[in-house]
Image (spheres, rainbow, N blue to C red):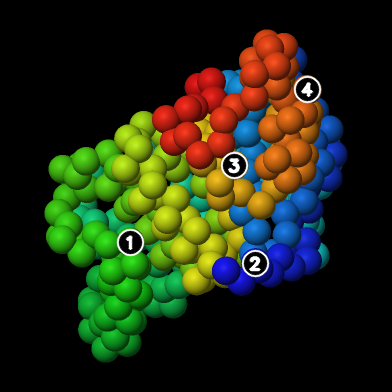
Amino acid sequence: MATKRIGDVVLDVKNISLAFGGVKALTDISFDVREHEIRAIIGPNGAGKSSMLNCINGVYQPQQGAITLRGRTYHGMSPRQVAEMGVARTFQNLALFKGMSVLDNIMTGRNLRMKRGLLWQALHIGPARREETEQRAVAERIIDFLEIQAWRKTPVGRLPYGLQKRVDLGRALAMEPSLLLLDEPMAGMNVEEKQDMCRFILDVNDEFGTTIVLIEHDMGVVMDISDRVVVLDYGKKIGDGAPDEVRTSEDVIRAYLGGEQTQPQRHRDTEELPA
C-alpha cells in the first residue's frame, strides 16, 4: 500500500475562544489541518466539538483568535462566503429536504456552481437548460460514487437513516469542496452502515484528494481512519497528535473514563465514546 502524501497546512486555527454570555464554549484552541489528511476532533459531550466546526464554517464568530484557510484569514464571513472558499459541511442532525428526491437534494449542493440567475432558471431555456444538464451530470456521478443509484428518484424521507446520511454526504460533495467538515457522519448507524461510511470517507479523501475534518464518537473509527486527532474537553484542548499517541494520553483517558487506566480498544466498531 502506497504511503499517503500529506501536504502543507491548509487550515490554521489560532487561539480561538468562543463564549455565549458567561458560558465559555471554546478557550484558546489552536490546531492545524494539513492538505489531504483526515483530522479528527474528539471529546466528551459538551467539549466544544460542533462549536469548533461552526467557527470554521462561519456559523459562529469567535470573540478571539483567527482562522486562516490557504493563507486567507477570514473575519465575520457568512457560511456562504466560507463555502465559496471551498469549505463544505455535513450536520449531526440531518437537514435534508425530506420531500425531495435524492437527486434533487444533491443538486442543491450545486447552487454555488450555478452561473445563471433565478429568471434564467425559471425560464429553463438556452444557457440555463444546458447548465442544468451539466450540473445534473455531476450529481449523477456522485450518486454513482455513493452507490445510491437505486434511490435516485426516491424522496429522501422514505430512505433508511443510513442512506439519508449518505445523501447528506453527497450534497456536501456536490459543492466540490477542498475542505470537508463532517459532524458525526456515523451517528446512529449500525456496524454495517458504519463500515460503508468509513469506506466512502476514505475514498473521498483518496480519490478526490479532499481534506477532511471529522467529529466522531466511535473510537474504533477514529483510530482506523484518522491521520491526526485533536481532543477537546470542556472547551479546552487536552490532546493533539497521531491516534496512537492520543489514545495513550493520561489526560485523554481521564476525560473519557474518569481516571481509569483502561484504554479504548482498536478495531471495535461497536465501541463508542460517550455521547
Return the disc, 3 or 4, that comes first in the chain's sequence.
3
Q: Which residue is mark 4?
A: 251
Return the disc, 2 or 3, that comes first in the chain's sequence.
2
Total numbered circles: 4
Residue at coordinates 33% horizontally, 43% vertically from top-left?
A: 193
Amino acid type of the residue that numbered disc 4 sits on in the rendered structure? Asp
Amino acid type of the residue that numbered disc 3 sits on in the rendered structure? Met
Residue at coordinates 29% horizontally, 56% vertically from top-left?
A: 105
Please tell me whether residue 198 is drawn above or below residue 128 in the rendered image.
above
- Front-most of 238 and 110? 238
Return the disc, 4 or 1, that comes first in the chain's sequence.
1
Which corner quadrant of the image does residue 144 belong to?
A: bottom left
Return the disc, 2 or 1, that comes first in the chain's sequence.
2
Q: Which residue is mark 2?
A: 4
Q: Are circles 2 and 1 on residues that touch, CB within 8 Å?
A: no
Q: Which residue is mark 1?
A: 146
Please tell me whether residue 270 is drawn above or below residue 72 in the rendered image.
above
Q: Which residue is mark 3?
A: 223
Q: Is residue 244 left or right of residue 175?
A: right
SS under mark 1:
loop
Return the disc, 3 or 1, that comes first in the chain's sequence.
1
